Image: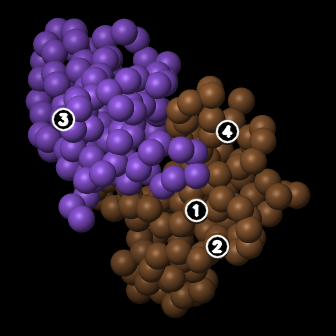
Amino acid sequence: AQSVAQPEDQVNVAEGNPLTVKCTYSVSGNPYLFWYVQYPNRGLQFLLKYITGDNLVKGSYGFEAEFNKSQTSFHLKKPSALVSDSALYFCAVRHLIKAAGNKLTFGGGTRVLVKP
Amino acid sequence: KAGVTQTPRYLIKTRGQQVTLSCSPISGHRSVSWYQQTPGQGLQFLFEYFSETQRNKGNFPGRFSGRQFSNSRSEMNVSTLELGDSALYLCASSLDGIVEETQYFGPGTRLLVL
């Protein structure tokens, strides 16, 4: 079965410091990995995805993620966090569940709090 | 392009009632998926529609149903509401629903069942 784990419920970081949000996955076949962010009372906003190619993926708002096949990880990173980055972050894997059609399986989410 | 829109944004219902939620995908997108978000269960897949056909369904009871229209707009219906159906219901669309595509989410409909 496909699964995604986000081991940290919350990450606290000071503004200007590097931010890392961890994600590990378990899938059969090629993983299609996504990061989304959710602000209060809002839907999910797409940040970036890994389909194939370079292991370092660059996305919106200065975020990037590193795909590591041997460690089955897809950690989200930002070199210098902003207070406005405080939000709920979700890692997800998209996979085929039959010949046609697919779905996203999400991790439990990590709340990021960036303090001034 | 306008994003995914969902109506209504907020709903309050009582147990036993039924509810219909609506989702308009990004123009040109033909795949629409629905997800339920609750504090206890997180984000869970409900179903996916493509070209008016349900392609996949998650592990939800038959009280949860949906449909898609020829213009790709989608509705989901929950009958005989239970307290546990209180959640944020999110709709997402993508162009052709292939696995590599990004799904873009709407703002959600927050349903409260009393």
Question: In the rendered image, what is the letter of the chain coloured purple?
Answer: B
Left or right: residue A29 versus residue B73 is right
In this rendering, the answer to whether B106 lies above or below A77 is above
Quadrant in which residue A72 is drawn:
bottom right
Q: Which mark is residue B114?
A: none
| Contact (Cβ within 8 Å) of mark 1 with mark 3 | no
Q: Amino acid at mark 3?
A: Ser
In this rendering, the answer to whether A25 lies above or below A77 is above
Q: Are marks 4 and 2 on the same chain?
A: yes
The 10 Å Cα crowd at callout 1, few under 14, some 14 to 19, many 20 or more, is: many
Between tags 4 and 3, which lies in front? Answer: 3
What residue is drawn where x is 39% and y is 80%? A83
| Contact (Cβ within 8 Å) of mark 2 with mark 1 | yes
Query: To which chain does the residue with label 3 belong?
Result: B
Between tags 4 and 2, which lies in front? Answer: 2
In this rendered view, identify the residue nearer to me: A17 or B35.
B35
Q: Give the residue pinned by disc 1.
A: A49
Query: To which chain does the residue with label 1 belong?
Result: A
Q: What is the spatial separation of the Cα atoms under label 4 and label 1, in whole angstroms?
A: 16 Å
Q: Which mark is residue B22?
A: 3
Question: In the rendered image, what is the letter of the chain coloured brown?
Answer: A
Q: Give the residue pinned by disc 2.
A: A57
The 10 Å Cα crowd at callout 4, few under 14, some 14 to 19, many 20 or more, is: some
What residue is drawn where x is 56% and y is 40%? A105
Q: Which mark is residue A3?
A: 4
